[in-house]
């Protein structure tokens, strides 16, 4: 029976310790949360600036709901596009220094829709092997020939671009890699895009709000020029602390995405009250130098406090600080031991990361303190010594 098959599949996952379980959090997002009645110190969220439960944003959401109600009622192209969405798009474009921005419901939907708006059957798409799942899915939907290059390998990418006879080419990459925390070589990628007449689509889910002047993101961090080739995607549920995403770039590129990206066209517009909340979030991001400085201090402190020998702290300059343990079972064991000490750090296993590179993904937030970080480092060093 079909149904028995599902039950057997789930049992098999459970046996291999691959069944995922959700923890239920009983407090607003933050470093200190009760989970199943236990107070935990969490290093899991992507709330890098500590805005997800900021009183200013809670107040803005209340105000937004009073002004705009709750739902948008329709898709953006029918009647679900409000004045506050327009204002938000203008502010986003201004913050990242590009001519135009389009606001979408989630980063996943942005990444599903954008590649298909630009390339299709017979075209070629070049993707970093460690790209986020949403980019992998977005690439597949294009029906273009998808070439995956080894992580960050510009030589391999150049060779693939050289060999391609496709008319339209698109390079697709995370700006900050979500499971490694390293930064893509965007200036070199843009150079390759120019040389081979390609677009460069950059997913800055983990850099927007965190990197660059005024938190304008990884493209601003590198001071990339404003060119139609660069298609910049930022998400608004991580450092921005709310929900949603945007694509920023050239007028015609953004208009093309607005006209044809199916995850934009065929979904109900995101609640205008969220757009109102995001305006307040963008203020906090632009004025967030102190939050970013504190975050940088936490990153340095953690790295200095973790001279690991058997495990490897990946060389990441961002709030994503992965400790690679390797073996799945050992990684789970360590995560469980931390949990028992009141420390919540997610264990990330294949297929999310390559086989043999299971890891703890520590993520830091400006809401953490130096003591929080010292406490975590201390626990990790002890566990490594005992392993
Ligand atoms: C989280 C994430 C997304 C998805 O963004 P959502 O707004 O959460 O849907 C896309 N790309 C990367 C690299 C991410 O980490």
Image (cartoon, rainbow, N blue to C red):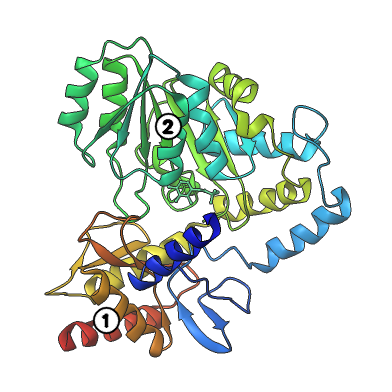
Classify mark 1 as within 8 Å of ligand 1 or not, answering yes or no. Answer: no
Query: With 37 as the anchor, is 308 left or right in this view?
Result: left
Of residue 2 and residue 73, the one placed in the foreground of this image is: 2
Q: Which quadrant is home to the C terminus? A: bottom left
Which disc is residue 363 wearing? none
Q: Can residue 348 be seen in this view?
A: yes
Name the residue rendered at 53%, 75% in the picture: 23
Residue furthest to the left in view is 309
Query: With 208 as the anchor, is 324 left or right in this view?
Result: left
Q: In this view, does 193 lie above or below 336?
A: above
Q: Is residue 363 visible?
A: no
For marks 2 and 1, give the CA distance: 39 Å
* Secondary-structure class at tag 2: helix
Query: In the rendering, at what x and y percent does residue 54 appear?
Result: 64, 67
* Secondary-structure class at tag 1: helix
Would you name the residue on which mark 1 appears? 380
Query: Between disc 2 and disc 1, whose residue precedes?
Result: 2
**Nearer the viewer's eye, disc 2 or disc 1?**
2
Residue furthest to the front in view is 1
Where, by quadrant of the figure, is residue 217 drawn? top left
Q: Residues within 10 Å of mark 1 (few under 14, many from 20)?
A: many
Q: Residues within 10 Å of mark 2 (few under 14, many from 20)?
A: some
Q: In this view, does 83 lie above or below 8?
A: above
Query: With 151 as the anchor, is 115 left or right in this view?
Result: right
Query: In the rendering, at what x and y percent does residue 31 appear?
Result: 50, 76
Query: In the rendering, at what x and y percent does residue 181 appear?
Result: 32, 55
Of residue 301 and residue 146, the one placed in the foreground of this image is: 146
Name the residue rendered at 77%, 40% in the picture: 84
Query: With 187 as the anchor, is 27 left or right in this view?
Result: right
Q: In this view, does 4 lie above or below 127?
A: below
Would you name the residue on which mark 2 appears? 140
């Amino acid at each position: 029976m079909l149904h028995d098959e599902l039950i057997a599949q789930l049992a098999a996952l459970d046996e291999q310790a691959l069944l995922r379980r959700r923890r239920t959090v009983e407090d607003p997002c933050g470093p200190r949360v009760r989970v199943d009645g236990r107070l935990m110190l969490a290093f899991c969220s992507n709330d890098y600036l500590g805005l997800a439960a900021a009183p200013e944003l809670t107040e803005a959401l209340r105000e937004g709901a009073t002004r705009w109600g709750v739902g948008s009622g329709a898709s953006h192209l029918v009647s679900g596009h409000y004045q506050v969405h327009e204002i938000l798009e203008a502010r986003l474009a201004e913050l990242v220094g590009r001519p135009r921005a389009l606001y979408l419901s989630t980063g996943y939907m942005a990444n599903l829709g954008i590649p298909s708006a630009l390339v299709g059957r017979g075209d070629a798409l070049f993707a970093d092997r460690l790209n986020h799942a949403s980019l992998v899915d977005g690439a597949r939907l294009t029906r273009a020939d998808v070439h995956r290059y080894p992580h960050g390998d510009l030589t391999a990418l150049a060779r693939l671009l050289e060999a391609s006879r496709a008319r339209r080419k698109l390079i697709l990459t995370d700006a900050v890699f979500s499971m490694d925390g390293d930064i893509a070589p965007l200036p070199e990628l843009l150079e390759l895009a120019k040389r081979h007449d390609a677009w460069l689509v950059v997913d800055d889910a983990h850099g927007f709000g965190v990197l660059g002047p005024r938190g304008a993101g990884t493209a601003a961090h590198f001071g990339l020029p404003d060119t139609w080739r660069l298609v910049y995607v930022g998400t608004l549920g991580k450092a921005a602390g709310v929900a949603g995403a945007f694509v920023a770039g050239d007028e015609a590129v953004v208009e093309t995405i607005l006209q044809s990206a199916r995850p934009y066209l065929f979904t109900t517009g995101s609640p205008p009250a969220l757009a109102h909340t995001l305006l307040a979030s963008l203020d906090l991001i632009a004025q967030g130098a102190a939050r970013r400085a504190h975050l940088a201090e936490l990153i340095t402190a953690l790295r200095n406090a973790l001279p690991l020998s058997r495990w490897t702290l990946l060389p990441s300059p961002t709030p994503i600080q992965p400790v690679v343990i390797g073996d799945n079972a050992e990684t789970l064991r360590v995560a469980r031991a931390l949990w028992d000490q009141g420390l919540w750090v997610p264990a990330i296993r294949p297929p999310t990361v390559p086989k043999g590179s299971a890891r703890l993904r520590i993520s830091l937030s400006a809401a953490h303190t130096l003591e929080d970080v010292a406490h975590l480092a201390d626990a990790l060093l002890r566990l490594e010594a005992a392993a």
